[in-house]
Image: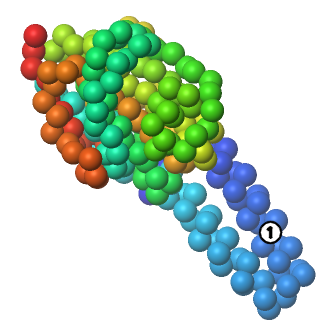
Amino acid sequence: MKLHKESKGTIIVASIAFAVVAVLSIYFLKNLSLLIIIPLLVIYGLVFWFFRVPKRNIQDHTENVIAPVDGKVVMIKEVFENELLQTKVIQVSIFMSPLNVHICRFPVSGQVIYKKYHPGKYLVAWHEKSSTENERTTVAVESLTNHKVLFRQIAGYVARRIVFNCNEGDAAKAGHEFGFIKFGSRMDVFLPLDTEIICKIGDKTKGGIDVIARMTDQ
């Protein structure tokens, strides 16, 4: 199983912690040490599972808006986007549990025209206000269909590290990785009002694969 490069520090810390607790358990608890070691081994395995990098057959897309992450669609609503677009848009929010793949992908193809990091709170990621109050990033892409599409990585109650590896002027390719969020979190995608929304609340998404919306060239 291939692991994401962001796993290195976490796995080192987890390995040291597991080894120390296991040794102390064996020394002090003797035969009862398995009551501690087995649950810890399960948690240790889940750390590796969290950082897995699944193989995905990423296609080229022009009009399609691709799910940027694995997770569950928890919100589809009309909102006013006041950071960059300054207009009403459709917000599609996808929540990622700690068991989901946390690679973040471009939802559309085009060119990156904006990026910004925002420090903030750590409300639970499904909270509506987390989109504007939590630690987050904002990225905007001028799509191949000549639309401005904005999207945000949002830290959750557990997530404390957001990575986004793109810069203004970079080429964006729908479905390809631009960042990573550690542990439970959320991604919001803000689309023009005339966008055809294909997903619905409750849908499970596979990042880089599933089409969540479609925009026609303007």
Residue at 41%, 13% in the rendered image: 82
Left or right of 94? Residue 26 is right
Q: Is residue 25 visible?
A: yes
164 over 125 or under it: above or below: above
Name the amino acid, label 1: Val
Seen from this angle, which residue lies furthest bottom? 31
The residue labelled by disc 1 is 21
204 over 212 or under it: above or below: below
Quarter holding the N terminus is: bottom left
How crowded pointer 1 is (Cα within 10 Å; few <14, some 14-19, many 20+) is rated as some
Q: Is residue 70 visible?
A: no
169 over 102 or under it: above or below: above
Quarter holding the C terminus is: top left
Residue 38 in the image, given as x and y percentages of width and height: 65, 78
| The image quarter in which residue 67 lies | top left
Residue 180 in the image, given as x and y percentages of width and height: 49, 36
Label 1 secondary element: helix
| The image quarter in which residue 57 lies | top left
